[in-house]
Image (cartoon, rainbow, N blue to C red):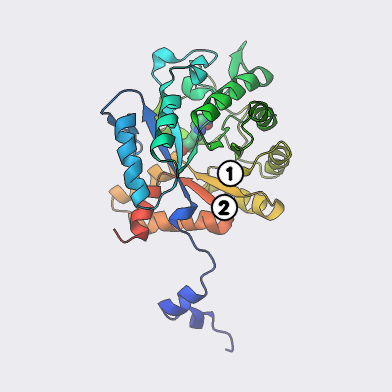
């Protein structure tokens, strides 16, 4: 035997030397949930160790995350049902606590990057990402609402707009409106290949945002399709997306890899709530080692080609990376 691949694995120094994929806290984006009020740290049963924070406590949490090396946050609003309506008008209301929160967070921590979510579902009485007209999700009537939401977020100081709604043409529509309002420096990370996945369940528990009827299959992608992601990516990039996202992550590593191979635009992946919940549940039962399973999951996403990873594991990974 002339070739023995095991020789290159025989000790940790050699293994480290030839390691192909490297993951650090710099590659992670931490999704966080904001709720109105003060002194709130609400548990989410299906998302262990993730909370709905009121702004006062969230500022402290962000400070702690910064001390661990996390610099990039994606913020989601948990909106009271009484503020939801068919047009999601609270999403751009003057007194919106989410917009006030963005403003305060950016003011307190000017050096972090803050990303938003743009879709109607957290504010919609129908629980859909677009406007419901005669029982259908109307694409073109949704675009101006998404644009209003984006402008309001840009005015509040957001760095990156994250359209997660999967309406056609929304990236271009939002880009144009941002530019018209002078926000040429505000980026767009589009949820580009977002699949109609069962793995968003815990997130919908966190925001109480599950669809009130039907499902999201008329706008989110069919999990059986891969080539269709090329169409979505081509469109989003041509409409001005600065980064394109695949979601969920580990069940769609082939899609991440394909987009990375085919486009120069940076690719990110959303390691979604269900992926996080699975590892937690198994670790709680003693069936998986939490740290090892988390690290391997995140590494696999990076290896597939993701430049950045949105993950609820960000804080735990950052601690692990620092041996805390
Ligand atoms: C809202 C949105 C969803 C997620 C991110 N933005 C849920 C959905 O589309 O139903 C899911 C994130 C996760 O599961 O962690 N449009």
For the residues bearing labels 1 and 2, Cβ distance under 8 angstroms? yes
Left or right position of 91 against 279: right
Task: Please name the residue shown 32% across and 51% down the image.
Answer: 283
In front of the other: 209 or 318:
318
- Residue hosting label 1: 246
Q: Residue furthest bottom?
A: 2
Q: How many marks?
A: 2
- Where, quadrant-wise, is the C terminus in this rendering? bottom left
Task: Please name the residue shown 30% across and 31% down the image.
Answer: 56
Residue 101 appears in the picture as rendered: yes
Q: Residue furthest top?
A: 134
Left or right position of 42 against 269: left
In front of the other: 260 or 243:
243
Q: Could you say whether the residue bearing mark 2 is in a helix, strand or loop?
A: loop
> N-terminal of the two: label 1 or label 2?
1
| Gap between marks 1 and 2 measured at Cα | 9 Å
Task: Please name the residue shown 71% across and 52% down the image.
Answer: 262
In front of the other: 14 or 200:
14
């Amino acid at each position: 035997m002339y070739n023995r691949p095991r020789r290159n694995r025989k000790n940790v120094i050699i293994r480290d030397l030839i390691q192909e994929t490297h993951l650090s806290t710099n590659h992670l984006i931490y999704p966080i949930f904001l709720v109105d009020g003060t002194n709130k740290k609400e548990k989410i049963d299906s998302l262990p160790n993730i909370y709905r924070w009121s702004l006062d406590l969230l500022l402290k949490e962000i400070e702690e995350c910064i001390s661990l090396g996390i610099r990039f946050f994606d913020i989601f609003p948990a909106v009271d049902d009484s503020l939801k309506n068919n047009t999601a008008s609270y999403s751009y209301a003057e007194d919106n606590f989410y917009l006030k929160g963005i403003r305060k967070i950016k003011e307190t921590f000017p050096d972090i990057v803050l990303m938003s979510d743009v879709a109607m579902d957290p504010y919609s009485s129908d629980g859909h990402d677009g406007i419901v007209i005669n029982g259908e999700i109307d694409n073109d009537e949704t675009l101006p609402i998404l644009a209003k939401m984006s402008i309001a977020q840009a005015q509040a100081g957001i760095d990156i707009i994250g359209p997660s709604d999967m309406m056609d043409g929304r990236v271009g529509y939002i880009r144009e409106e941002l530019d018209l309002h002078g926000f040429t420096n505000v980026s767009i990370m589009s949820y580009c290949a977002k699949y109609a996945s069962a793995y968003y369940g815990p997130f919908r528990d966190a925001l109480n945002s599950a669809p009130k009827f039907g499902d999201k299959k008329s706008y989110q992608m069919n999990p059986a399709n891969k080539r269709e992601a090329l169409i979505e990516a081509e469109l989003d990039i041509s409409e001005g997306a600065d980064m394109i996202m695949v979601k969920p992550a580990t069940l769609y590593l082939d899609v991440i890899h394909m987009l990375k191979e085919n486009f120069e635009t940076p690719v990110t992946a959303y390691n979604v709530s269900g992926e996080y919940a699975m590892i937690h549940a198994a670790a709680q039962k003693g069936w998986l080692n939490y740290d090892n399973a988390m690290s391997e999951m995140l590494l696999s996403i990076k290896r597939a080609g993701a430049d950045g990873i949105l993950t609820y594991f960000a804080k735990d990974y950052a601690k692990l990376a620092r041996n805390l």
